[in-house]
Image: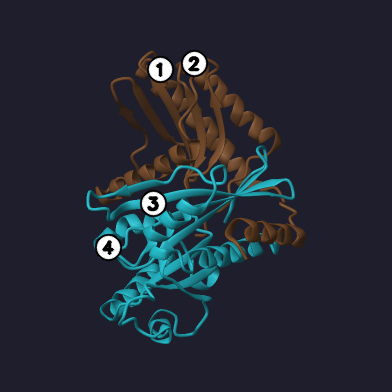
Chain colours: A brown, B cyan
Amino acid sequence: MVEPSLVLYGALYQRAMDVLQETLQETGARYALFVDRKGFVLAHKEALWAPKPPPLDSLATLVAGNAAATQALAKLLGEARFQEVVHQGERMGLYVDEASEFALLVLVFDDNAPLGKVKLHGKRAAETLARLAEEALANPPKLNLDTQYREEARALLDELFGN
Amino acid sequence: MSTINFANREINFKIVYYGPGLSGKTTNLKWIYSRIPEGRKGEMVSLATEDERTLFFDFLPLDLGEVKGFKTRFHLYTVPGQVFYNASRKLILRGVDGIVFVADSAPNRLRANAESMRNMRENLAEYGLRVEDIPVVLQVNKRDLPDALPVEMIQAVVDPQGRFPVFEAVATEGKGVFETLKEVSRLVLARVGST
C-alpha cells in the first residue's frame, strides 16, 4: 500500500490543536505534538510556561523511527502492536502513543507532570486524534499546485544547490 | 507521498540515500550539511555506532524556501548499508518520495551494488511500491579510485534498462553531491505539480 498523505486543514487542524492544548492543560506536559509516521510534524502546541523546545524536526523524526522499530519488535514477538511508549529520565519524560495507523501523539513532560495523568489523558487524546486522522484521510483536500509551482521550485533549487 | 501542512503552509518531502555499506551515503549528507548556509538547514542527526557506521539512519532537514506560498522542505535520510541491518533499512523507506542510490565504484563492490539494489526493490515492494513508481537517481561514487570500474559496468548491474539518471561523484570532495541532490529534488517536485 502506498503511504497516503495525511493532510490537516481548516476545522480538522483546529480540532487537532484544541486536543493538543487540552492535553497540555490536563497533564501538565511541556509540549504536545501530532506527527505522522514518516516523521513530519502535523501540529504542535507548547505550554505557555515551557522553555524553548528542542528542534521539532529532529524530535518527530526520532520518535517516528523509534515507533517504527517498536512496531517491528512487536511483530517479531507475535504481537499486533505495542501501543504506548514511555521514556523517563531524571527530569524529562516522553510519552508516545498511536493515533491511527498513520500518526502518533507525542507528549514531552518534566518531573512536575504525574505520569499517571500523562498516560490517562495521553491515551484519550490519541484516540481523538486517531479519529481526526481517519477523517482527514477520508477527505483529502485538493492541492491545486500547477506548473508554476514546479518552475518557482526549480529556480529555488538553482539558488540553493547551484546551477 | 509528500506531507502537506496547510495550516503552516508547508510541503515536506522525504528523500532517502540507499546503497551498499561504505558506498558514501553518510558522506553525501555530511558534505551537504557543511555547505548549506545556516537558516536553510536543521540539525543533522546521526544514529551511528562508535566506529561511525550508520546504525539506524542519518537525518538532515533542508529548507528550499517558499514556493507559491508554501514553505518547501526536504528531509534527507540515509539507510544503514550493512547487510544485516535490513530490518532498519525497510523502516526508513516508509513514505519515501525520492531515492538516491549511491553505488560504489570499487571492483570488489560490484556484487554489493547489485545486492543492495535487489534489496531495495524487495523493501519497496513491502510498501506496495516499485522502483518505477518513485524518482530514483543513481550516483556512482568514488570515481577517484585508481581501479574504479567503468560507469556503464555498474549501471549494467544496478539499472540494466538505464531508467535512472546517472551522476558520477567523489563525495569526499563534494564532486557530484549537489548535482545528484538537485536532480532527485527536481524529479520529486515535478510529481507534485503534475498530480
Amino acid bearing label 3: Asp
Task: Find residue B58 and name its label.
Answer: 3
- Count neighbours of disc 2 (C-alpha within 10 A) and say few if under 14, some if 14 to 19, many if 20 or more: some
Give SS at disc 3. strand
Numbered disc 4: secondary structure: loop
Q: Answer yes or no: do the residues labelled 1 and 2 have beta carbons within 8 Å?
A: yes
Q: CA distance from mark 4 to mark 1?
A: 42 Å
Between A59 and B132, the one nearer to me in the picture: A59
> Which mark is in front, 2 or 4?
4
From mark 2 to mark 4, how far is it between C-alphas? 45 Å
Q: Are marks 3 and 1 in contact (CB under 8 Å)?
A: no
Judge if badges 4 and 1 mark residues of a common chain.
no
At mark 2, the secondary structure is helix
Q: Which mark is residue A26?
A: 2
Say whether residue B149 is left or right of residue B97.
left
* Amino acid type indicated by mark 4: Gln
Front residue of B109/B141: it is: B141
Pointer 3: residues within 10 angstroms few (<14), some, or many (20+)? many
Residue on which the image places disc 1: A117
The amino acid on which the numbered mark 2 sits, given as a three-letter code, is: Glu
Asked which quadrant contains residue B91, the reply is bottom left
Disc 1 to disc 2, C-alpha distance: 7 Å
Query: Which image quarter: residue B86?
Result: bottom left
Q: Position of residue B139 (x, y in %)?
A: 45, 72
Q: Give the x, y percent position of residue B167.
A: 49, 74
Going from N to C along the chain, the mark reached first, 4 or 3, is 3
Query: Of residues B30 and B83, which is closer to you in this image?
Result: B30
Chain for disc number 3: B
Measured as percent of width and height from the top left, residue B78 is found at 40, 57
Looking at the rendered image, the disc whose residue lies closer to the viewer, 3 or 1, is 3
Q: Amino acid at mark 1?
A: Lys
